[in-house]
Image (cartoon, coloured by chain):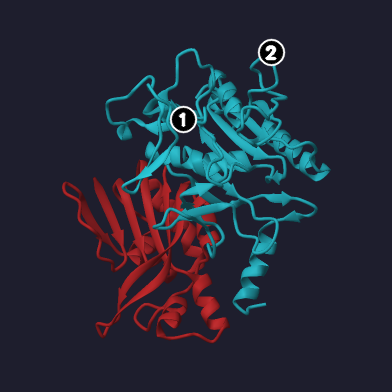
Chain colours: A red, B cyan
Amino acid sequence: MKVAIFGNVQYPIEEGAVYERLDIHEVVKNNKLDGEYDRIVVSNCLPELRRDKVMPFFKLVHDALTQRGEIIIQVPSAEYACKQMFTNNHNNMVFYMLYGNDAVPFRACYTLLSLRTLVERSGLVVRKAAQELMEIQTTTGEKDVMPVHALIGVRND
Amino acid sequence: MSGTMDKPIVDIGVACNFAQSYQWWVSVMNLVLNESRWGDVTINAIRTVGSALPDHNKNNVIGNFVKRNALTDTNRTEVVKGFLDGRADYIFWLDDDTAPPPDAITRLYKAGREFVSGVYFLPQPPYHPIAYVRNAEGLYHPVVKYPKGALVQVDSVGMGCALIHKSVYQKIKDEHKVFVRTTGSLAAIHKSQIKNPVFTSHKKREKPFVKAGYLSEQVIPQAPDDDRTFPFYQLEYGRTEDHYFCELAENVGIKPWLDTTVVCEHWKMQGVNNVQHEKYELEQEGLE
């Protein structure tokens, strides 16, 4: 199994699988994603893309997946973050969820419905769309859990 | 798949009370028209039953293809029998007060799951979805605070907007054995939970009893000449028949998925949908 990983995430290693770490900005800039992958993991980096680059990226992902290959996407939950802002419960994590950080600013945020709609429009079949908790570590080493949307899409042309 | 142009064939199963609101009929007609014209499925038949109750003495099939001499032995389970005897790949369950969106079946089919449900809501506060997760004590709690657009696995769903592949029923049937209880009712037990010896009769008829923390009851295997159908749906211990079915499915490794983009109206005196549910949640959180 060949797996592409976008994003700074620790991904569980499966025996016999080949892993390749890729940069989402490079792929979008070159408009090219070579190779065939059984799984593409896009963890907490989709918000770094400008909105007009998201669908072209999904198109590249779609074409790079094998038949029945799957994309796993995790993005910060816009619903959760906005609710915290609205009720004045914001903290550093909430600001990060909406805006990213200085090194990696976010350019878009996603509700689960908007993310699912985008993935479906790219021709992938959504097999799971849920809210989960992701453990994150700050640059100073502090750990926290962040509500994320986790979506699995499958290529089934 | 054997439908037109490789489209899957779907039967629609409806548990009916006496009369349905005109709004419900409009939505069902729209569903059938829409799916027939533009959907990714082929509608094969509408199978209706006179009550959702699984008591074999009380119900009345009015639309099943299975012919019968009397109107006394039918229920949701009988609809399933007709479905299993037919050519459809899936059954889409509706209640006579749940009005699905016109593309509900296609959208549920596209989720690619063998057992998937749309969402409909309790028709009174707190308007929670009729979809549940089970706690450690075995009790069911409604799924709440889900984000819009969720497609998540749950422990139980209602049969008011559920698409189920034929293989789910077949697998349940293959992996369970049916016993007759002391009440004469049927119980399906997963074969892995049956310990020998199994008696085909008992010398003395005894009432169920509790001993050492176990409820014990005499049961005998369903006789070959007992023509009652497999008990896919049963009301028991104050629980609705959908929980029973979901537990049978779980026994064979299949749990339902809930697609919250397929939102039904739940018609009682007025329609209830996600609007009331979300308003209630926002009120509870002080956001409205």
Checking the image for residue B181, the label placed there is: 1
Q: Position of residue A34 (x, y in %)?
A: 30, 51
- Residue depicted at 37% across the width and 48% down the height: A70
- For label 2, the crowd category at 10 Å Cα-Cα, with few meaning under 14, some 14 to 19 and many 20 or more, is few
Q: Position of residue B183 (x, y in %)?
A: 52, 31
- For label 1, the crowd category at 10 Å Cα-Cα, with few meaning under 14, some 14 to 19 and many 20 or more, is some
State which chain disc 1 sits on. B
Q: Position of residue B69 (x, y in %)?
A: 69, 13
- Residue depicted at 16% across the width and 49% down the height: A15
Which residue type does callout 2 highlight?
Answer: Asn
- Residue depicted at 70% across the width and 60% down the height: B124
Mark 2 — residue? B69
For the residue pair B85 and A146, the one nearer the viewer reads as: B85
Which residue ends up furthest to the right in the rendered image?
Answer: B22
Picture quadrant of residue B27: top right
Asked whether disc 1 touches disc 2, contact meaning CB atoms under 8 Å apart, the reply is no
For the residue pair A125 and B81, the one nearer the viewer reads as: B81
Which residue ends up furthest to the left in the rendered image?
Answer: A15
Dot 1 falls on a residue whose secondary structure is loop
Total numbered badges shown on the rendered structure = 2
Is B244 rendered above or below residue A17? above
Is A102 rendered above or below residue B115? below
For the residue pair B113 and A13, the one nearer the viewer reads as: B113
Which residue type does callout 1 highlight?
Answer: Arg
Checking the image for residue A93, the label placed there is: none
